[in-house]
Amino acid sequence: MSNVVIPTAAEVKERLAALGDAEMQALARASGVPFTTLSKIPSGETPNPRIETVRLCYEALSAKAAA
C-alpha cells in the first residue's frame, strides 16, 4: 500500500479558484473531470466533491506545477 497524500476539498477548491477558464478547460482535459464539475467546486455549488474527483484534480494540478 502506498502513502498517497490526497489534499482536502478546501485545498483543491483554493487551487481551482486561482485558475482562469482556459486553464480550467486544460485541467479538465488532463484530469478527465468534466469542466462543469470542476467549475462547481470553487463556486461552492459542489461543496464536498468526491474523493476520486479531488484525486484526479490534484494529480493533474501537480503534473502542471512540475512541468
Image (cartoon, helix red, strand yellow):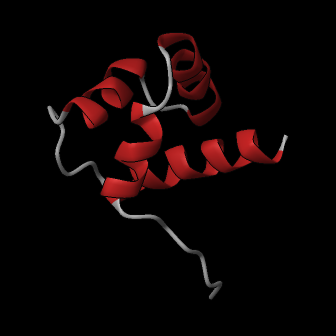
Residue furthest toward the front? 18
Image coordinates of residue 37 in percent, x first then y, are 32, 28
Residue 4 is drawn in which quadrant? bottom right
Quarter the C terminus occupies = top right
Q: Is residue 15 left or right of residue 66?
A: left
Relative horizontal placement of residue 62, taking residue 48 as reference (left or right): right
As drawn, the residue found furthest toward the top would be: 22
Image position of 55 (left or right of 42): right
**Of 1 and 18, the residue lying toward us:** 18
54 up-or-down from 28: above or below? below
Q: How many marks?
A: 0
Compared with 66, 5 (above or below) is below
Q: Residue at x 25, y 28 (%)?
A: 40
Q: Residue furthest right?
A: 67
Say above or below: 6 vs 37: below
Residue at position x 31%, y 55% in the image: 10
Considering every residue shown, the one lying at the far bottom of the view is: 1
Picture coordinates of residue 43, whole percent (x, y): 22, 29
Image location of residue 65, percent across then percent down: 73, 44
Q: Nearer the viewer, residue 62 or 4?
A: 62
The image shows residue 27 at horizontal and vertical percentages of 58, 28
Report the quarter where the N terminus lies: bottom right
Question: Residue at the spot x=42%, y=49% of the render?
Answer: 12
Q: Is residue 31 left or right of residue 42?
A: right
